[in-house]
Amino acid sequence: IDPIKLSSNTKFKSVLPINNISDKSVSYAGSKASNFGYLSRLIKELNLNVKIPENAFVIPFYFYEKHIESHEIKKLITELCLNKKQYIEQGIIQRYLENIRNLIISSEVDSFLIRDVENQVKQSNFHRIRFRSSTNAEDLEGFNGAGLYDSKTGLLDSVEKSFELAIKRVWASTWNYRAFMEREYFGIDQNSVSMAVLCHRSFPNEKANGVIITKNLYRDNSRGFVINSQYGEISVVKPPQDVNCDQLICYSDIRYKNDSFYGKKNIIEYISYSNILPDSIQTVLTSAEVNLITRETAKIKKKLYRSFSKKNKGVSYHDYALDIEFKIYDEERNIYLKQIRPFKN
């Protein structure tokens, strides 16, 4: 079977504000950034109360490709692709991948890119920036790629947490051992993998974080969205051992606002509770927050389902789902949506 060759467009040679990114930007901005740009447009179009992280922009594929070409890292990657089976069998694959990562991090980044990023950041009041991976090897049909790559934080005018170091560490995570082996398992052409970077303000000391799946995972073809949420910055996606999160089903889908039963009640059904909450708090999210998140994301789902159903006949609204990550931040407990992708069981 021929490997799956991924495309990467390198014609964009400057940092791109998020307003320039849409669902058509995958070829040069990667899946995560493309989905984020589309989410930004949907929030404005639907006049939602939720937000996306401010000061968002994208470092396109061009700069990663230039970095690995100009420092002869591409030669190491090509050699790896030619000898990967041998390296895996000999048990030296992890060491080889580590060499690639170290060379990406130790090599100097194009000074034009750093100036471009700094100028973009200086246009806002947010100088603590989160740099997030956005590859062409994730959110593909049959290959989700979630959790394979790294995100890093950089501070303007910092040496220890410089933008350059954060960017290089995100690029280097393209060659994480687990990421490489997952791509290998799914038959992806490793030589065609490329990394863009989604950038936006960082969220130190967030109040809560979570994931909403816009379908009922427990009852097929039934109403209800599933929400996993956790107190503070403890990850829902990759939690520490023995840490549980709140998990619930909420039935406040705006699609059923005229329903004689569901439309007149805000029904929340808890499945599990977080075991790290302070004594003064009973649940991670308030009932009002649960209902608001459900109603807002239902508007997004309804909008996207219209176009999805035209191409995918026979898939019901109940069975169609999105995977949306969110954060609760600041004393006003604003709700930020930070990632959206199609959900598949």
Image (cartoon, rainbow, N blue to C red):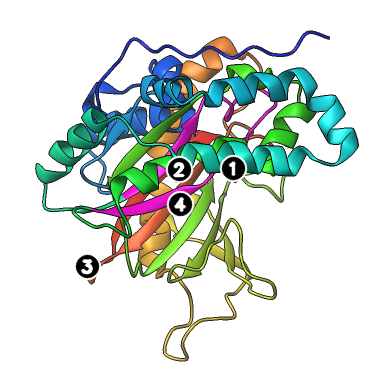
Q: Which residue is mark 3?
A: 332
Residues 326 and 163: in front is 163
Q: Earlier in the sequence, mark 1 or mark 4?
A: 1
Q: CA distance from mark 1 to mark 3?
A: 28 Å
Q: Which residue is mark 4?
A: 252
Q: Which residue is mark 2?
A: 106
Q: Earlier in the sequence, mark 2 or mark 1?
A: 2
Q: Residues within 10 Å of mark 1 (few under 14, many from 20)?
A: many
Q: Position of residue 327 (x, y in %)?
A: 38, 57
Give the image quarter of residue 204: bottom left
Q: Which residues are magenta?
A: 130-155
Q: Position of residue 102 (x, y in %)?
A: 54, 43
Q: CA distance from mark 2 to mark 1?
A: 45 Å
Q: Are marks 1 and 3 in contact (CB under 8 Å)?
A: no
**Which one is closest to the eye, mark 4 or mark 3?**
3
Q: Is residue 164 visible?
A: yes
Residue at 35% of width from left, 27% of height from top?
A: 38
Q: CA distance from mark 2 to mark 4?
A: 51 Å
Q: Amino acid at mark 1?
A: Lys
Q: Are marks 2 and 4 in contact (CB under 8 Å)?
A: no
Q: Earlier in the sequence, mark 4 or mark 3?
A: 4
